[in-house]
Image (spheres, rainbow, N blue to C red):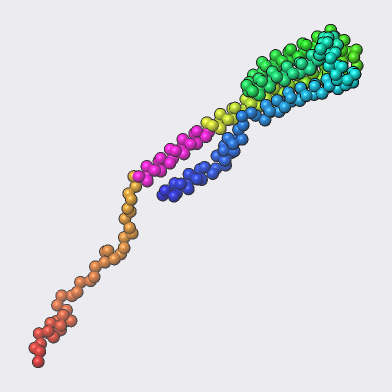
């Protein structure tokens, strides 16, 4: 009976549902795949804007000379250095909020996107970037588009998928608890049944227990002959 009980427990644990639960629990990570993709895109935003700014420095007369003009002699109307700083600000704020602190709300991305959008609009309207060639159009437009793509990724991909994963995880954990409780209850029932049953069972009844030899006929001829032989005198 104990072997049957252990085999039944093994069969319960080897069901496809339990295997799926174990695989799901093994695949749980500290950060979801969609959030990691979002963080990679934020990093791409910073690197891409930095690359465009470096290309702009080379095109307009060399990196050292242009760094001196745009950084040391910063002019809001002609410098692209503030657009680079805006990309650094977005990267630092979003990575801190959604990778380090693992924030599950949209307020951080809303603040960064609002600041970036307002700054770029004012920069294009007030400054003289449009008169400086293709980079005067390219850097503000690229920075604006990347900021709004990050907002779309977080609001329509990251947060809804993670909310769905949390619901699925809670359902699976509830099912696992219910399955374990029912399994424990069944095991205890089997164990109680085993404790109540007697250790020794009566064996099969043999026909020899009820067999009685036939009674001999009283005063039969053979008995008389034997008695007669015994009574004869010995010569």
The segment highlighted magenta reads 175-195
Expressed as whole percent of the image width and height from the top left, the position of residue 65 reads: 87, 17
**What x and y, as percent, mark residue 135?**
87, 18
Q: Is residue 113 left or right of residue 232?
A: right
The residue lying at 50 percent from left, 33 percent from top is 177
> Can you give x and y, in whole percent of width and height, for residue 85 in the image?
76, 16
- Toward the top, the furthest residue is 126
Q: Quadrant of residue 79?
A: top right
194 in relation to 88, above or below: below
**Residue at the location (15% across, 75% down)?**
218
Foreground residue among 186 and 102: 102
Q: Is residue 92 left or right of residue 79?
A: left
Mark yes or no: residue 172 visible.
Answer: yes
Residue at 30% x, 64% y is 207
- Image quarter where the C terminus lies is bottom left
| Relative depth, front residue between 191 and 202 | 191
The number of callouts visible is: 0
Quadrant of the rendered image containing residue 185:
top left
Work out whether residue 138 can be spotted.
Answer: no
Magenta stretch: dominant SS? helix
């Amino acid at each position: 009976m104990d072997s049957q009980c252990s085999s039944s427990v093994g069969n319960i644990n080897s069901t496809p549902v339990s295997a799926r639960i174990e695989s799901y629990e093994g695949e749980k990570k500290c950060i979801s795949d969609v959030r990691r993709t979002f963080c990679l895109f934020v990093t791409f935003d910073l690197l891409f804007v930095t690359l465009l700014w470096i290309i702009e420095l080379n095109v307009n007369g060399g990196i050292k000379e242009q760094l001196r003009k745009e950084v040391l002699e910063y002019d809001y109307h002609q410098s692209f250095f503030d657009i680079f700083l805006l990309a650094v600000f977005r990267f630092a704020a979003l990575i801190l909020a959604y990778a380090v602190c693992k924030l599950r709300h949209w307020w951080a991305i809303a603040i960064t996107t609002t600041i970036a959008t307002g700054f770029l609009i004012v920069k294009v309207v007030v400054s003289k970037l449009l008169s400086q060639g293709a980079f005067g159009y390219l850097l503000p437009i690229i920075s604006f588009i990347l900021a709004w793509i990050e907002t779309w990724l977080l609001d329509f991909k990251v947060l809804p998928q993670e909310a769905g994963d949390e619901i699925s995880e809670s359902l699976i954990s509830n099912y696992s608890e219910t399955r374990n409780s029912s399994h424990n209850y069944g095991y205890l029932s089997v164990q109680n049944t085993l404790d109540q049953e007697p250790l020794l069972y009566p064996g099969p009844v043999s026909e020899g227990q009820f067999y009685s030899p036939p009674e001999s006929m009283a005063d039969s001829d053979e008995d008389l002959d034997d008695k007669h032989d015994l009574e004869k005198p010995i010569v």
